[in-house]
Amino acid sequence: MPAVSRLDEARHEIRRVILSFLEGAGFTGLDEVVRLEVPTEKGHGDLTTSFALKAAGRTKVPPRVLLEQLLSWWPDVPAVESLEVAGPGFLNFTLRTRWLAEVVNQVRAMPGQYGNSDFGQQQRVLLEYVSANPTGPMVVVSGRAAAVGDTLARCMSAAGYQVFREFYVNDAGNQIATLGHALALRLRELEGEDVESNWPEKVYPGDYVKDLAKAYRTLHPEFATDQAVEDRYPELGAWAAERIRQSQETVLREFGVTFDQWFSERSLRESGAAEAVIDRLRNRGYMAEREGALWFTSTRFGDDKDRVMVKSDGSYTYFVPDAAYHAGKFDRGFDYVIDLLGPDHHGYVNRMRAVVEALGYPPERLEILIVQLVRLLRGRELVRMSKRGGDFVALEDLIEEAGVDPARFFLLERAPETPMDFDLNLATLKGSDNPVYYVQYAGARIHSILRQWHAMAAETVPVDLGLLTSAEERELMVLMARFPEVVVRVAEDRAPQHLPKYLTDLAAAFHAFYRAHRILDVEPGLRQARLALIEAVLAVNTRGLALLGISQPEEM
C-alpha cells in the first residue's frame, strides 16, 4: 500500500476537525463542501478551503462569521502552525515546518516509488496512441502523441491504474494498395524507367519509397514489374507497410516508447469483426438502408449527421473497422478506453461516442484526446528538415538533432490539445534557458555534492530535520509533499503538462536554496539535515523525470 502523502495527512486531519466543528454547531451533511486545496498563488498558506462560502446557503451564517467562530474554537492540530480568514470567506492554513519536514524521510524511505498511490483503484485502462499510418516515416506530431501517451501510461500506472498500451496499425484498405503502387513505380525506376515525369496524383512521392524498392529488389530479384503488377499492389503495399511499421517501432523504442500490443486492422477484418459490428447495430435498431447504402443513425446519439457504413457497392467505409475495433476494446473488459488522435480527427469524436453508446457501452468510458500540431522553429525561422523527401518532418530527424530528453520534455510542456512551437535552438542549448537542462542540472548538481560528501570522512551524527527552518528549505519540503498529488492530477485529468511545470518549480526552488545556503561547510548536525533534504530532492526529481521518460544524468 503506497504511503499517504504528507499533504493528504494534513488534509484528512484538518477536514476531520472542521466537520467536527460544524456538527457541534448543528450543521450536518456538509461533507462534500469541505475540501482543502493547494492555493494557486503564494501567500495564501499551504492549504486553503472555501467551505464557508459554499455552505452559506445551508448554514444561513455569513462565511466570515462562521470562520471566526471556527478560529475561536480551533483545537491544537499537530500539522497546523496557523490559520487565517481571507477575502469573503476563505480559510488558509500554514503547516508546521517541523511536521512538514517528515516528507524528507518519506521520500528517502521509498525513493523509486515515492509518488505512487492507489487512486485508480486498479481500474483497467486501454490507452491507444500514435497509431500512425504505416505508409511513411513517423512524423513529429506522432512523436508528440507518443510522448503524451507514454507519460500518461507511466503516471496512470503510478496512480494505481492497470494500463494497457496499444498501437492500432492501419494495414488494410486503399492506402495500402496506394503504397504498393508507389513501390511498383520505384521498382520500375530501378530498372531505368522515368517515373517522376508522370507521377500519379495521390501516390506517395517520398524518397523513403526508393529505399523500400531497393530492399524489395534485394529480397525478390525475380520480381518483374511488367507482369500484371497492378494486381500485386495490395501485396506490395502489405510488404512495404510491415517494413515501415518495423521502422516506426524502432524509432519509437529509441524515443523510449513501447507498446503491449500492435493491433492489426487487417487481422480485425479477417476475423469477421466488421460484419459482426454491423449485425450488432442492425439488431439494436440503429441501421437504416438508403439509396442502396447502409447507414448508422448516429444522429440519435448527438452526432451532426448519420454515417454511411456500407456503400452502395457493398464496400465498407473506414468507420466500420473503427467501430469494430472499439467494440473489441470494450469487450476485452477495460473500464476506460482512451484514444489519442491527431489534429485532423475532430469530426471523429462524436461519431465514435455515438457508436459506442449504440453498441450498449457507457459513452463516458470512451475518452478521445486530440493531440495538436507541432511547428519546428530555429529561432523564428520555420524549419523543414526532412532527409527523406515528401512534405513531412520525420521524428527520427528531430531525435537526431535535439536528442530524446529535450524532445520529450518540450513536447510535453504544453497541453496536448494546444498547438505548439518547438524551438530547436533552445532544445539544443546547454544552459539554464533550456528547461530540460535546467531541471536535469539540479539533479546533477546534487549528485556532485553527494560525491564530494562521500569522499569526506564519515560522520555518525543523527539526522535532525528540525534544523531545516529556512524559507528555501521549507519551499523544497512543500514541493516534495505535493509530488504525489501532481502525479494523480496528470493521471486524473489526462494532462501530462503539469509534470514538467512541477519539475521546473522544484528545480528553481533547489537552485534558490543552493545559492542561499552552504551544505557541506556547516556544523555537522545541519550538514546531515541538508544532505538528507537534497537527497530527497534528487529522488523526487529523478522519479519525476522518469515518469516523463527522461533521464537524470549524474554529471553535466
Image: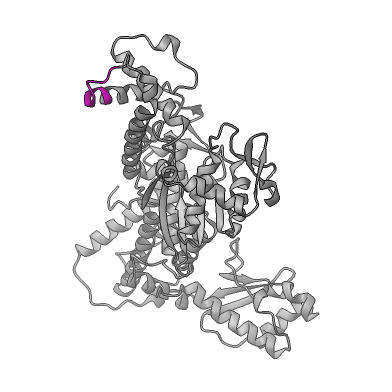
- Farthest-out residue, bottom: 24
What coloring was used for the rendering?
one colour
The range drawn in magenta is 216-224
| Residue 293 among magenta residues | no
Residue 519 visible in the snapshot = yes
- Does 231 appear above or below 420? above
Point out residue 165 in the picture as x, y percentages from the top left corner. Answer: 41, 53
> 544 or 232: which is nearer to us?
232
Q: Residue at x 34, y 30 (%)?
A: 240
Q: Residue at x 69, y 85 (%)?
A: 22
Location of residue 1 in the rendering, given as x and y in whole percent from the top left corner: 39, 75
Q: Nearer the viewer, residue 14 or 180?
A: 180
| Side of 64 where 375 appears, left or right | left
What is the number of callouts on the image? 0
How far across and down, in percent of the image, does residue 181 sit? 40, 22
| Residue 339 visible in the shown view | no
Q: Closest to the observer: 125 or 333?
A: 333
Q: Quadrant of residue 227?
A: top left
Quadrant housing residue 155: bottom left
Left or right: residue 350 compared with residue 406 = right
> What residue is shown at x 34% (from left), y 47% (from top)?
256
